[in-house]
Amino acid sequence: MLSYTLRRLAGAIPTIFIIVTLTFFMIRLAPGGPFDLERPIDPLIMLNLQRAYGLDQPLWQQYLTYLGNLLQGDLGPSFARRDFTVNDLFAAGLPVSVMLGGLALGLAAVLGTFFGTIAALRQNSWLDYTIVALATFGITTPNFVVAPLLSLIFGVILGVLPAGGWSDADPRYWVLPIVTLALPQVAVIARLVRGATVEALRANHVRTARAYGLPARVVVGVHALRAALLPAVSYLGPTAAALMTGSVVVETIFGIPGIGRYFVQGALGRDYTLVMGTVVVIAIFVVVFNLLVDLAYAWLDPRVRYD
Amino acid sequence: MTDPVLSVRDLRVTFQTNDGPVQAVRGIGFDLGRGETLAIVGESGSGKSQAMMAVMGLLAANGKATGQAVYRDAQAGGRPVDLLALSDRQLNKVRGARITMIFQEPMTSLDPLYRIGDQLAEPLRYHRGLSKAAARPRILDLLRLVGIPEPERRIDSYPHELSGGQRQRVMIAMALANDPDILIADEPTTALDVTIQAQILTLLADLQKRLGMAIVFITHDLGIVRRFADRVAVMRAGEMVETGPAERLFTAPEHPYTRMLLDAEPEGRKEPPPAGAPELLTGRDVRVTFRIGGGLLKRGRDFHAVDGISMRLVQGQTIGVVGESGSGKSTLGRALLRLLPSTGRVAWLGRELPQGAQEMRPLRRELQLVFQDPFGSLSPRMTVGRILGEGLLIHEPDLSPADRARRAEAALVEVGLDPAMRNRYPHEFSGGQRQRIAIARTMILRPKLIVLDEPTSALDRSVQKQIVMLLRDLQGKHGLSYIFISHDLAVVRALSDYILVMRDGRVVEEGPTEMVFDAPREAYTRDLMAAALSRDRFGRLALG
């Protein structure tokens, strides 16, 4: 298992390298540069700026410099926020995004599994139909609708939670963003778990468990649910990476200092290093969580074993 | 006779379906004496399984059972309880403890995610209140009892680490864990190879002698129960048409349906082709190798599925390829048709068959294949007419749609189906009819050679017999050659004039059918014969 993990991580290095390379050159293809303003800057100042950030060198040299710095964990200075390095920005924002995303993921996993299992056990009842209908609604409603609505209802009308803003110390600020992030995932997971549980309940080995007089909680909890969780586990990997690297919409609407905004801001402002840094962080998250999913899969299903 | 341990009266099972209620069991009744073996025999769809599922409270959600199933538990002083009237909770005290069941599908009846020791412990934990640790010695005893080698090691295995036969032994161990009064065995050997079938049957017979429980044995194969059952009940379309002592039922069956079942063994022999018949297909040193495991840096292990086989097929001949699952017989069939990459020579009419898919295409018309699974091999979204015409689109593109329709109708008539059926979809047909459609699909192209890969294995005995006769008729009429792959020796004997016996990718014995059947040279062939023929109603080998 350990050697498998190490091999997978080693295998991820070329992947990340290719992503970094492609992104580096693709963003340079976009017209404009980090210091282009609506009003043209004095050419001499521009030249100085470019020299200060190394943009006057040939592209391949900039690329090699970036790779060299990246290997040392240095994501470079931000072009748009002159006083900060990209590392500084992520050091401040990433913990917020990871915490929000992680809590949202946990909430989605627990609620999704719960509702999915209930719906499967009461298949074709009104409860099942209600859950499936709500899940479809949850999947189809975009978060830029959900977020302002929640903010309006709980923040403004009821006034029980802050309508926006952020505090590291006060969990009341976390609730609405987490719920906004979690809702669509609850819906997806509930549907996945429902489908898999319906199937698992029909499996021959579940029939065996019933034929041997095992209590219903054992038949469902031990024999059906474990098999039913497998598809949801596969789904959680990429979802975890997506949630923990922040959401532009949620961060913008609630005013949260996460890293989700950086991707869009960086891309629009041609903040090359910020875009690159975001891509690298997301790539690492995807690689790590896919690996975790595969390890969890092997742990749940003994037929899948890596050596 | 003391009170029967189980008395079923007027048992009816109804399923609510979209097409209205369907009665699967229509008022059956029988008694099961203590320590008795009752075989319930019938073809698929006769309701034999559903009747016992109803007794165990295991019907699907849309199924409902009425009537009575009175069980007398000796441990409870023989007090009668109607199982159909119990709640799930009450029923859970009986099933798995006093009445247990083993199923047809040994590969999937155990939970793939848990060690077999944990699964065997469950009936002991929930019925006797034993802890996992306390159950362990009992489980080891049980595994020994059912003949699992190295029980100390196997107890911690996962189901996928065991063979089908071993898994069925584990299921039997689970069934015996709480010393039941009744063991219901629902087609326990159908999914297993013949030699394994014989072992499992012997084991069940032996265990019954030692432990004295009553057995209800559900099967579609009358031959299998002859020496095994005390009494036999024959079911057809949800009704019991005949019950009686096994001996009488076999020697003097009363109901015509029972006689038909007894008579369903495929009969007749195939004459060998004339001596000067032209050579069609020759294989020399054919090998198929699969790489197992391996990765970027590691070399995998080579698995020789077909390991150097040579054979020669002449026009009008049928070569039967027999062997147990995993012996490589299907792989050989596919390699000979160039559906799998292989080494060695395969020549068709004296010319080497090309390896490339493109170059093979024009030859495909003469070299056809029929599969085992009549349900999976026909596209569910195409009408029978389109399925039949598909091959013509490729091999005779000049035909007009009307010509194709005419050819499809002719092909349906040839396989004994109504030509009007060409506008219907595969799901409207029974397994036997679908297999006829699959045969019509090959016949429409007027092939010279058909590889038949277990074409009768998924069918009931009486239907098998019809398909065998159809295949023989078509062969006589069109001078076809067959390579007939099967583990079912009775069918092979009725169809083939030459036999290859395969084991582990090699031919261990070959020769004319009569010679191989009457005087097998190899021990493996003899085992295979013994196991197969003990199922045969004319068999000489007794079980148990």
Image (cartoon, coloured by chain):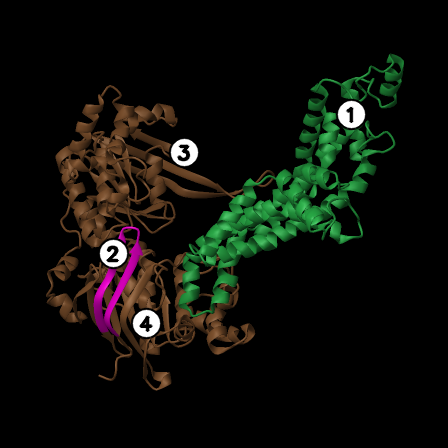
Q: Is residue A268 visible?
A: yes
Amino acid identity at mark 2: Gly
* Same chain letter for marks 1 and 2: no
- Using the numbered discs, state the Cα–Cα distance from disc 1 to disc 2 in whole angstroms: 72 Å
Q: Is residue A4 visible?
A: no
Find residue B445 and report its horizontal and vertical position in percent.
23, 29
Find residue B428 and report its horizontal and vertical position in percent.
25, 44
- Using the numbered discs, state the Cα–Cα distance from disc 1 to disc 3 in whole angstroms: 47 Å
Residue B443 vs residue A146, the one in the foreground: A146
* Same chain letter for marks 2 and 4: yes
- Residue identifier under label 4: B84
Q: Chain of mark 4?
A: B
Q: Residues within 10 Å of mark 1 (few under 14, many from 20)?
A: few
In the rendered image, which quarter contains the C terminus of chain B? Answer: bottom left
- Residue identifier under label 3: B341
Q: Magenta region's main secondary structure?
A: strand
- Using the numbered discs, state the Cα–Cα distance from disc 3 to disc 2 in whole angstroms: 40 Å
Amino acid identity at mark 4: Leu
Please provide the residue range marked out in magenta: B8-30
Q: State the hue of chain A.
A: green
Q: State the hue of chain B.
A: brown
Q: Residues within 10 Å of mark 2 (few under 14, many from 20)?
A: some
- Using the numbered discs, state the Cα–Cα distance from disc 2 to disc 4 in whole angstroms: 22 Å
Amino acid identity at mark 3: Pro
Question: Under tag 2, what secondary structure?
Answer: loop
